[in-house]
Every structure is written in structure tokens, then in C-alpha cells.
Image: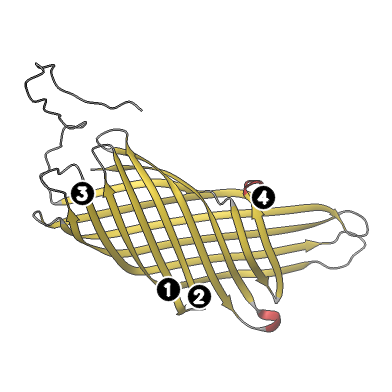
Amino acid sequence: MTVLLSGAAVAADLPVQQTPVFEPVEKTSPWTFELGAYGFIPVSVEGTSVVDGGAVDLDMDLGDVLELLDFAISGRGEAWRARDVNDGSAFGFVLDAQYVNLGLKNQGIGPASGGTVKADIRQGIIDAMLGYRFASLSPGSDTSQRLEFDVTAGARYNFLRQKIDVRPGLPAPFTANLGEDKHWVSPVVGARANFVLNDRWNFVLRGDMSGFGVSGENLSWSLNGIAGYRLTERATMRLGYRVYDIDYSSGTGSNKFAYDITQHGPYAGLSFRW
């Protein structure tokens, strides 16, 4: 690994002063903004899906997920206003959005081998949260290293589609359209610890919980461990790992709709700060 240092060569008996990798940008505003895009690719998905009372066990690996993946997009934006420059406390707002679409199409079923089965699973999440940074600690006078703690609370909008379209083909006289779309809003709380190691590297441990029995969502939670590397003064590349779990159900009997899964996998993103 290459270590970037700046400074003039000096005699061995003189102290060497190390300057930051990035020259600090003079801030005229108490606000700090960060906007980024990221991707989460599960290497394992396990759980149960229930559509119109019929349950199916899910057990997918990375190959299955990539084969079924039609589209995915995620982004996160944060705005923080410094409250006290001495202790590093701040108020903030966090907006996080995720969307994924999985599709399956099997052809050649039915008596005449002309039928099809299509499955459409889509999930969207939008978090809108207020945040408070209640600590920013630095060891001694070294301000390039610090430890920040944030807490967040707000609302989560959820969208979940589980639909199955069965067309047996001739001479079968019927088709079947199963499943539906679900929309609901639930409370969400979160916490984050940000370990700033130096001018280049930081490590974030972030978690959240939502649902708490509101609108049929018993509980959902996620835990993220993310390493960040500053490419430039503004841009940071992020790599990590994520575990996500959701337990949602509504209806009973033949009208039951449920989605109870656990998934985990790598996390990658790019963000810009100003």
C-alpha cells in the first residue's frame, strides 16, 4: 500500500512535519452535505414468500439472484448542521431510497407446452429521518482521527409486490393472476458509529430497525459495516457488508400475503461531500 506524504527533505536532526493528504477547504457555512449511490448484492437469500395463502420457501445464492435481477438502484443523501464546533455535535436530515426488481419467466409448460409462468417481485424502501450527532471525539490534538456517534429516527415508506401470472396454454381455458401490491408506512430508528482513522480512511458501523408491529410489518432490521476511502477532497469510495431482514404479513387463509426473508452480501458505493 502506498502512503502519501508531503513535505520537504530536512536534516536528520530536525523534526519532520507531516501535512494532510488533502488541503482543508475553508467552510463558510455550518452545513455539510453528502450525496451518494450504492449497490447491495445478496450472496444469500433465505425465507418464505406467501401469495394468496400459498407458501414458497426461498433459498437463493448469488447466482440465482443475478439470474433473476432485472433492475436495482439505491441512493442516500445527508445534510448536517453543526451545533457546537467544540464538541462536534450536529443536527441532520437523512434520506435513503432503495428499489429492486426480480423477475422469473418459465416457458413450455401445460398440456400443449405453450404455457408460461411469470413471477414479479419488487421492493422499494424510502427512509426520511432526523438525526443528531451527539459526540465527535478526537484523541489528544490529532484532529485527523475522531469517533462520531449519530442517532436517527423517522418514517419508512415500504412498497412490496409479489405477483404470479400463470398461462397454461391451449387447450386449457383459464389463466391465473395471483398476488398484489402492498404499501405501508412504519417508524424507523437507527444508530451509527463513524471511526475516522486518518485523512484517507474511515470505517462505519450502522444499523436500523423498523416496523414494530405497525401496518403488518412485525420487524425489519439491517446491519452494515462499511469502509470508506477518500479518492479526492470531495469523493469517497465505500465497500462493506450488509445483513437485512424483514418480516411482513397481512391477511389470513387464502388471502394471506407474507414476506419473511433474511439476506446478506457485499455493499459498494460512491459518495460526494461538500
Quadrant hosting residue 82? bottom left
The answer to whether residue 246 is left or right of residue 274 is right
The label shown at residue 146 is: 3
Residue at the far front in the pictured view: 13
Callout 1 amino acid? Ser
Residue assigned mark 2: 217
Q: Residues within 10 Å of mark 3 (few under 14, many from 20)?
A: some
In the image, which is nearer the foreground, mark 3 or mark 1?
3
The answer to whether residue 131 is left or right of residue 157 is left
4 or 3: tag closer to the N-terminus = 4
Q: x, y percentage for residue 252?
A: 65, 83
Q: Answer yes or no: do the residues labelled 1 and 2 have beta carbons within 8 Å? A: yes
Residue at (88, 67) in percent of width and height: 173
1 or 2: tag closer to the N-terminus = 1
Quadrant hosting residue 93? bottom left
User: Could you give the CA–CA distance between mark 2 and mark 3, rounded to whole angstroms?
Assistant: 37 Å
Judged from the image, the secondary structure of the residue bearing numbered disc 3 is strand
The label shown at residue 64 is: 4
Callout 3 amino acid? Arg
Callout 2 amino acid? Glu
Q: Answer yes or no: do the residues labelled 4 and 2 have beta carbons within 8 Å? A: no
1 or 4: tag closer to the N-terminus = 4
Question: Residue 4 versus residue 250: which sits nearer the camera?
Answer: 4
Residue at (39, 64) in percent of width and height: 208
In the image, which is nearer the foreground, mark 1 or mark 4?
4
In the image, which is nearer the foreground, mark 4 or mark 3?
3
Callout 4 amino acid? Asp
User: Could you give the CA–CA distance between mark 4 and mark 2, rounded to whole angstroms?
Assistant: 26 Å
